Amino acid sequence: MSTPALKIYNTLTRTKEAFRPIDPANVRMYVCGPTVYDYAHIGNARPLIVFDVLFRLLRHLYGAEHVTYVRNITDVDDKINARAAERGISIRELTEETNKVFQEDVKALGCLEPTMQPRATEHIAQMIAIIERLIVSGHAYTADGHVLFDVPSMPSYGRLSRRSLDEMIAGARVDVAPYKRGDMDFVLWKPSKENEPGWESPWGRGRPGWHIECSAMSWAHLGEIFDIHGGGIDLVFPHHENEIAQSCCAFDREVMANYWMHNGFLQVEGEKMSKSLGNFVTIHELLHTEKFGGRKWPGEVLRLAMLRTHYRQPIDWTVKALEEAFSTCVEWFVSSYGAPLGAEVPNEVVVSLEDDLNTHAAFTVMHELARRSGRGDALAASQLRASLDLIGLSLNPAHFEGFLILTRVVTRVGGDESPSVAETLRRLRRDYLTAIGQSEAEVDSLIAARLTARASKNWAESDRIRDELAAMGIAVKDNKDGTTTWEVKR
C-alpha cells in the first residue's frame, strides 16, 4: 500500500502540512462534541459534517479498522443545570432526551457513528488524576475550594491562538475572583452546591471545569499524544488553548495533538446567527419543520450545502444555497441511481480531498461524472456512486422523497431523448411508491376512479381522490385530450 498524500492545514503552525500519523495502524482523531442541554444549531452541524468527511477519507486511505475517531458528549455543565431547573426535570432526563435528538439529527446528516462517544460524567476519575498531576508539577493550585491552572507556569501558553495577553484576557471573558493568582488562570475543579451535580474529590465535593473534560476523555481513549484534534474556529481560544495547557503540562509533552484543524464560522442570510435576530435555526428544525425557506430539508441537502464551501472558509447559510444543493443532489441522484456497486472512487476525487479536504474540487469532478453518466457512460455512473459514498451522500430512494422532483433535471442529465434517463426515472418512480407502501397499479387505480368521477361530474369525489394522491406526494395533471398523467412532487 502506497503512503497516502494527505495534506491538512494545521492551526498550530498556520501551514498546510503533509499528514504523518504517529501509527498508521491506528490513526487517532478527537473532535469536540455537543453539550447536551439544547438542540444543536446549524453552526454546530458544520464540524460534525466536516470531520465526518475526514473520518471517511482516513478510513479510505488507511483502512476502516485502522482509524479511531472520538467525539465526546458533555453531560455536566452549568448550562445543563440551568436548563434542567428551568424545565423542572432532572439533569439526567434532560441530557438523555437532548442526546437522543442529537444522535438522530447527526444520522440524518449522513454522519457515520464515531468509534467512541465518551461522556464527561463517565471520566471524572481521569479528570481528577490529571488535576492531581498538575498540582504536583506546580501547574495548578487550590484556592477557596477551587483548583485552578496557573497560566504563567506555562511559558508557551497562547501558541495555538497566537494572541497577546491583553487579547486573551478580553477573549476569555475573565472571571474576577479574589482566590485567583492571575487574571488568565482558569478553573479545573469547582465546588458544587447541594442542588448541583457533584463528585467526591481530594478538594471536596465538586465538579469539573469545562476544559479539563476533553483533556481527560482524549487521554483515556487516544493517549497522551494523538494525531488530529478538530473543532470549530470559535474553540481555538480559550477551550483548545486550555486543553493543550492541561494535557501538555500534566504529561510533560510538547504537544497534545500533532495536527489541529478548525472549520470556519457560519452566518445566516448574511448575519450572525442569534435568537434576538430571529435567525437562530437548529438542525432539528431544518429537518422537521418549514421554518427555513418554507420547507423541510433532507439531511443530505444540508450536508451538501455545508460542503460546497471549503471547511476553513466562512459560510453564509441561505435558502438559495439550500435550493442549489437540492438541485445538485437530484442531478447526482438520477445520474448514479441503479449504477452497480464496486467501482473505485476516481483518483481525481481522492486527490482533491487529500488536499486539505478540497470538496469544491471533488465536486467539480463529480459534476463531470454526472454529465458523462447522462450520456450513457455506465462506468461514470458507478464512479459517481462510489464518490457519493465516500463523501457521505448515500442517495437512497427510501430517504429521498424530497428529491424526486425529477422533471426539473432531466435535461441536465441527458435530455428527454436519453433512454437511460427515461428508464432511471421510471425506476425511481416505482421505488418511491414502494418506499411509501404503494404501487403503480394502486396509483393507476385511483387515477382511473378519479377519471370516472370527473366523467360523471362528481367533483367532490374527484377532489377527494386528488387530495389522497397529493398526500402520497403525487400530483395529477389533467390534459386537454381528457387523459390524466401523474408525477412525484414531494
Image: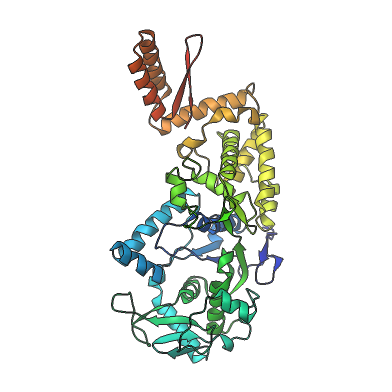
Q: Is residue 483 above or below residue 149?
A: above
Estimate the x, y position of residue 277 in percent, counting from the top left: 50, 55
Q: Is residue 481 above or below residue 245?
A: above
Q: Residue at x 62, y 42 (%)?
A: 343
Estimate the x, y position of residue 331 in percent, counting from the top left: 60, 35
Q: Residue at x 32, y 79 (%)?
A: 193
Q: Is residue 309 above or below residue 146?
A: above
Q: Is residue 26 visible?
A: no
- Give residue 169's quadrant in the image: bottom right
In the image, 134 versus 191, the foreground residue is: 191
Which quadrant is home to the N terminus? bottom right
Q: Residue at x 50, y 49 (%)?
A: 110
Estimate the x, y position of residue 325 in percent, counting from the top left: 58, 42
Q: Is residue 55 visible?
A: yes
Q: Is residue 471 above or below residue 307?
A: above
In the image, 310 versus 63, the foreground residue is: 310
- Looking at the image, residue 403 sits to the left or right of residue 324; the answer is left
In the image, 320 versus 270, the foreground residue is: 270
Q: How many numbered badges does the structure rendering display?
A: 0
Estimate the x, y position of residue 24 in percent, counting from the top left: 61, 65
